[in-house]
């Protein structure tokens, strides 16, 4: 009878352990699915959106570029030369949605876009590499996901580029 109790105890402990592991796995999957929602502003490295419209005190304005994008002139390019480490691209007074991409020397390309009058993007670069930053006409996103999105035919604004000082 003593051996039966040990077997029952082992079975109960094993059952509790199994239930605990299933529950822990369930919680991990829920936490993993929540994390991307909380980091919706995060983009693939080296690009991320900055939540604040204020530029950090440890940055210097290096260029201000007024731009107009149209169907004829739908893309603008800014070459990031060697020597820059981190840059902030601040789009201001943008009249319609735009897309942007960052292309690296090794052919990687990072894409994102936004709508709204102002948006600020932080770009982490390797100081020994060259990058190409492009911005172009964006898309109007429909609230109804079954509808086709429409291409914007004109957008204008100002792009201010800041060098981050460490």
Image: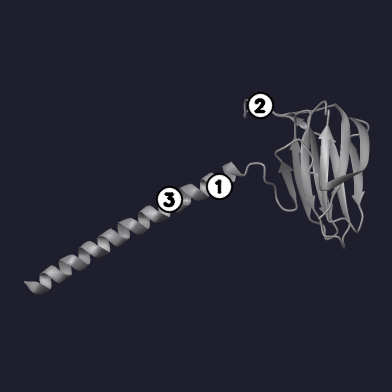
Q: What residue is shown with label 1?
A: 35
Which of the numbered marks, if any, corresponds to residue 27? Answer: 3
Q: Picture coordinates of residue 68 (x, y %)?
A: 91, 30
Quarter of the image for residue 143 reads top right
Which mark's residue is nearer the viewer, 3 or 2?
Answer: 3
Is the residue 81 above or below the residue 143 in the image?
below
Q: Quadrant of the C terminus?
A: bottom right
Q: Residues within 10 Å of mark 3 (few under 14, many from 20)?
A: few
Q: Choose between 60 and 108: the one closer to the eye.
A: 60
Q: Residues within 10 Å of mark 1 (few under 14, many from 20)?
A: few
Figure disc tally: 3
> Which scheme is used to colour this image of the protein?
one colour
Secondary structure at numbered mark 2: loop
Q: Picture coordinates of residue 107 (x, y %)?
A: 82, 57
Q: Residues within 10 Å of mark 2 (few under 14, many from 20)?
A: few
Q: What residue is shown with label 2?
A: 147
Mark 1–mark 2 distance (CA, rounded to whole Å) = 28 Å
Q: Earlier in the sequence, mark 1 or mark 3?
A: 3
User: Along the horizontal axis of the image, is 148 left or right of 160?
Assistant: left
Who's the residue at 67% across and 42% down the image? 41
Q: Earlier in the sequence, mark 3 or mark 2?
A: 3
Mark 3–mark 2 distance (CA, rounded to whole Å) = 35 Å
Which mark's residue is nearer the viewer, 1 or 2?
Answer: 1
Q: Choose between 57 and 112: the one closer to the eye.
A: 57
Quarter of the image for residue 138 reads top right
User: Along the horizontal axis of the image, is 36 left or right of 96?
Assistant: left
Q: Choose between 59 and 40: the one closer to the eye.
A: 59
User: Along the horizontal axis of the image, is 51 left or right of 95?
Assistant: left
């Amino acid at each position: 009878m003593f051996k039966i109790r040990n077997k029952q105890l082992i079975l109960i402990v094993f059952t509790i352990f199994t239930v605990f592991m299933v529950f822990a796995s369930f919680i991990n999957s829920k936490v993993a699915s929540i994390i991307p929602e909380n980091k919706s502003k995060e983009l693939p490295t080296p690009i991320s959106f900055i939540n604040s419209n204020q530029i950090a005190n440890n940055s210097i304005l290096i260029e201000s570029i007024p731009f107009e994008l149209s169907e004829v002139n739908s893309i603008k390019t800014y070459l990031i030369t060697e020597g820059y480490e981190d840059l902030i691209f601040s789009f201001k007074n943008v009249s319609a949605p735009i897309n942007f991409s960052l292309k690296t020397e090794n052919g990687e390309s990072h894409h994102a876009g936004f709508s709204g009058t102002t948006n600020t993007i932080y770009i982490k670069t390797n100081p020994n590499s060259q990058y190409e930053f492009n911005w172009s006409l964006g898309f109007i996103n429909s609230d109804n996901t079954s509808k086709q999105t429409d291409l914007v035919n004109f957008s204008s604004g100002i792009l201010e580029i800041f060098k981050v000082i460490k």
